[in-house]
Image: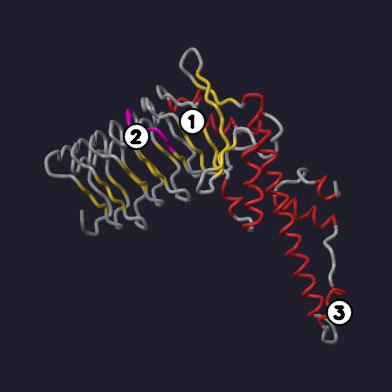
Amino acid sequence: MMGCFSSSETNAFCDCTALLQQVSIPPSVTELGDGAFSGCSNLTDVQFAHKGALQVIGNYAFCNCLALQQVSIPPSVTELGDGAFRGCSNLTDVQFAHEGALQVVGNDAFCNCTALQQLSIPPSVTKLGHAFMGCRNLAEVILLGEGFLDLDHLSGEAALNKTKINEMFGPGLSAFSDCRLTTIKIELSQRVARLPIECRRSVEGEIPDMQRLELTQDGNIFASYAVIRRLLGSMNVQDTNNQTAASLHRLLRLISFHELKESSILTELAIWKSRIDQATTPVQPKERSEYRVLIPDPAKCLIMEYCGFTGFLEPTIEGD
């Protein structure tokens, strides 16, 4: 597809089963109409412009594209319509932009995509409807970012923000009805990645001893929650004996300690340099140590509060 049009008509290429095998959506397109490529059973490759203007993929836009195996939703898309990729039975890889604009994934958007086994959902998504109903081989869902944790209640099962999960996935995880979902993971890598490499290695070295936490070879950190299936088919996320919550508390405490330490060091260096710069006479190298000051505990508490983890590090501040 070439050109500078802004949207496609409803059913524009519906049932083009013989010739259409590849399609490239130009950056000028803002909306794909309902059923735009529905029934294109030989379509194997869909390329979206990464920096394009596409915002909406319409209802059933790629429904029953049986040969489609991979799709990467561009970061500009805010909404996937109902049944957008319904019945794409060979679809094994769905990629959402981590920092994209996607908010709504419509009902049945990936219904009966039976080859799909794993899925990562970005933090921008607020509603899934019954999006993955019938994906019977989907066993693992990864939630990107800390938004699904209740950082004020990390001491028990309340660490998992079940209210937000139910709002997004529906009661009983209805978004995944008829899936063999066994695990929901929460990705926790971003804050660790911002630490200096020595601090990061120190934190990562502790993770193997933390139950229900996983460190992958590429440095990603995941907290795992088991999915329990009930008698009537609904599902529930469970933290057995609060193992995940306890490990999360320990991990975030370590991260906070290193954040506080690094913030204190940088602040001390800045104050030290400022005092030297403001001296009335040039400070000789051997005299510079006299201008150094330590960050007082009240200031450390403010830094800790800024980091968002007041209450984690009192023993550290008090010297225990």
Hey, which quadrant is residue 87 in on the image? top left
Q: Which residue type does callout 3 highlight?
A: Glu
Hey, which quadrant is residue 16 in on the image? top left
Q: Residue furthest left?
A: 18
- At x 24%, y 48%, the residue is 8
Q: Is residue 242 above or below residue 252?
A: above
Of residue 266 and residue 133, the one placed in the foreground of this image is 266
Q: Determine the secondary structure under disc 3.
A: helix
- Sequence-first disc among 2 and 1: 2
Q: Which residue is mark 3?
A: 287
Q: Which secondary structure type mostly characterizes the magenta part of the structure? A: loop
Q: Is residue 37 left or right of residue 116?
A: left
Q: Is residue 14 left or right of residue 284?
A: left
- Sequence-first disc among 1 and 3: 1
- At x 76%, y 60%, the residue is 264
Q: Is residue 103 left or right of residue 135?
A: right
Q: Nearer the viewer, mark 2 or mark 3?
A: 3
Q: Which residue type does callout 1 highlight?
A: Phe
Of residue 306 and residue 104, the one placed in the foreground of this image is 306
Q: Which residue is mark 1?
A: 169
- Sequence-first disc among 2 and 3: 2
Residue 224 point in image, percent of width and height = 56, 33
Query: What number is the disc on residue 82?
Result: 2
- At x 25%, y 46%, the residue is 45
Q: Which residue type does callout 2 highlight?
A: Asp
Q: Which residues are magenta?
A: 112-119
Q: Residues within 10 Å of mark 3 (few under 14, many from 20)?
A: few
Residue 214 point in image, percent of width and height = 56, 38
Residue 247 point in image, percent of width and height = 66, 36
